[in-house]
Image (spheres, grey):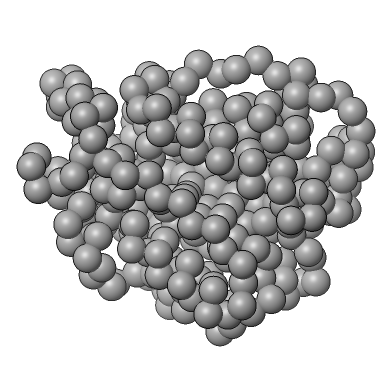
Amino acid sequence: MPEHPLNAATRHLLDKIRQANFPPIYTMPVEQARAGYQMSVGALAEPPVPVARVEDFSIPGGAGQPMRARLWADSKSAGLPVLLYVHGGGFVVGAIETCESMCRQVAKQSGAAVVAIDYRLAPEHKFPAGLDDAFAAVRWLVAEGSGLGLDGTRIAVGGDSAGATITASTAILARDAGIRLALQLMFYPSVQTGTLTDSFARYSRELLLSRELMAWFDEQYKDPSKPEDWKRQPLKAPSLAGLAPAWIGLAECDALADDGRLYADALRAAGVPVELREWPGVIHDFINMGRFLPEAAQAHTAVALALRQAFAGG
């Protein structure tokens, strides 16, 4: 694919994926798509690194239902700061298990606890059900986190792709509720819909995050009876002023790269501190491809450092 500035490792990985000839996710029934995505992440992500503490528990979700959660920490000390992590997957696929490899690395390298949630997915639960669950988890960690040995006054929120969209909107809801977050951490967020950016035009064909896949995700999560508001398009929120500092990580060869750049610009214009990192030659979801792409480990380490600095007060 000479029109894309892919690096050699990414080209090799894409060649292997094409040779495997797996059907695209968007051609599958939803349950099969979820199983297929989880299997592909398991094959591509680095093996989970051991950490001192792993705990499964539940958090009341946005509709009051029990929501599965998992905590990783490399210390059994009390008073750990915590990152709430929201997995990607177009609001349709993904689970705690699809972000576990990264979450373990971040917990080990940052010294913080990392908590991931199985928020409600579409099409069974239309957007913003997942956002409601993430914000409910933030509220719960503030109020009840001490019961898990966590410091409810030092909380960050992070996520990738759809999880980064939820992260951005959660940060806005937290600001409006008077909850102070130490950091909002986003990998390749989708922050608007219906706008054709240059990166979308260039990278939404032949690569893994295709326009067909994004259209399928849209079809699953949208509620036709409700207009799409800023919660799905945080770039269009009434105000971005006063939000938590942001760390945004991008893949160069990604349809959503321009969304991340635009959101960084908008946050800076609103006076929000932003660190923007971009990894050249890699594709969407590269953070879950550590068996093949060294940039995944680099990104995990960068996130851990950003968390250390944020929890230390800058």
The relative height of residue 136 versus residue 37 in the rendered view (above or below) is below
Residue at the far bottom: name it: 238
Q: Is residue 89 left or right of residue 246?
A: left
User: Where residue 223 sits in the image (x, y, percent)?
Assistant: 42, 66
Query: For the point 65% across and 15% down, which residue is it?
Result: 50
94 sits to left or right of 209: right
Q: Confirm whether residue 84 shows in the render.
A: no
Tell me if residue 88 can be seen: yes
Tally of numbered discs: 0
Residue 103, given in percent of the width and then of the height, sits at: 60, 32
The one nearer the camera, 297 or 83, is: 297
Q: Residue furthest left?
A: 2
Percent from the top left, x then y, of residue 254?
Answer: 29, 50
Q: Quadrant of the C terminus?
A: bottom right
The quadrant of the picture occupied by the N terminus is top left
Identify the residue at image location x=25%, y=32%: 10
Which residue occupies 56% across, 40% down? 302
Above or below 46: residue 89:
below
Q: Quadrant of residue 16?
A: top left
- Which residue shows up at 75% across the image and 24% down it? 74
Look at the picture and state if 303 lies above or below 226. above
- Nearest the viewer among 129 and 174 is 174
